[in-house]
Image: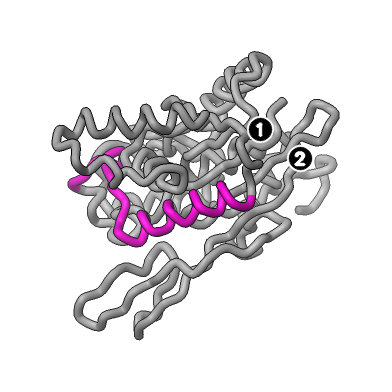
Amino acid sequence: MPNKVVLIRHGQSEGNVEESLYATTPDNAMKLTALGWDQAKLAGSELKSSVIGKDESIHFIVSPYVRTVETFHGILSAWCDPKEFDHIKDPLKRMQAWYGRLSDMGISWHEDPRIREQDFGNYQDPVAIKKCKRERHRFGTFYYRFPHGESASDVYDRVSTFLDSLWRSFDLKRSQNYVLVTHGISIRILLSRYFRYSIDQFNTLANPKNCDLVVLGHDGKGRLRLEGRHELILCDNGDDEQEGEETMYKSQHQSITLVKGYKYESRLRTLPKEWRAKRKIRLSYDDDV
């Protein structure tokens, strides 16, 4: 059993800022914004300084989407700045040199598509998606399948097979720590699957914020326990009323959201009560629910 398993949601992506992009850009190709890169770099610093023990080995498992791989690269800069290799002009050779240095430092990684984002269909019409999300809330958020896409229960199935593989990796003692760079729903599903949350409990969970760190630690008895969440703190230096994922760099009003730091939270993020999907289940035939 590793010392730590850390779940990290990707940094702010172009799609977080402008949903209309999904109509022309595949979800898997959404890149990080400038703020997203700042978030990823700070996540790496937090991971290195506050979560992972000094000189301990780390294995990263990364969703193959562009925004998660870019987040992974931003995190890695805490161990070795890729700019050290700017003198190498060939992009592939520059990446290989950087990766080689990181490998020498005890860092390993691989991609796994089973922890990718929930599939909402191919190119996504914003109007149609909003209609689907309203319909999903009425139908049941866990079971609703988007046209040409997936339901949360579909994600649950593939994440379950991923956890089986992850446990086999633990048995091989591949690394002292594991870090998963993935997506909000994948993190919620991973936690629900491992801790055996009910569907009602799953429906209370909110996505971690961009580049939040959810930390699981070894309890000394062969199990993982939730140690807490490192929540990214942002500050808005302008007149833009939006915050978090929805705030972007605005040239007109010079409204810029900056990464301020992290604060420690002992609990997971939860949805407001009015947003939680509820099941009506009777105790008997004539029960009034």
Residue 230 is situated, as x and y percent measured from the top left of the image, at: 61, 56
Residue 158 seen from this side = yes
Res 99 label: none
Is residue 32 covered in magenta? yes
Sooner in the amino-acid sequence: mark 2 or mark 1: 1
Q: Residue at x 32, y 43 (%)?
A: 82
Q: Quadrant of residue 245?
A: bottom left
Q: Report crowding for label 2: few under 14, some 14 to 19, many 20 or more residues within 10 A (C-alpha).
A: some
Q: Indicate whether 203 appears above or below 89.
A: below
- C-alpha gap between disc 2 and disc 1: 13 Å
In the image, 103 versus 149, the foreground residue is: 103
State the residue position of label 1.
193
Give the magenta part as a residue range. 24-50
Amino acid type, mark 2: Arg
Residue 127 seen from this side = no
Residue 104 is situated, as x and y percent measured from the top left of the image, at: 45, 27
Amino acid type, mark 1: Arg
Q: Indicate whether 204 appears above or below 157.
A: below
Res 225 label: 2
Q: Residue at x 36, y 38 (%)?
A: 69
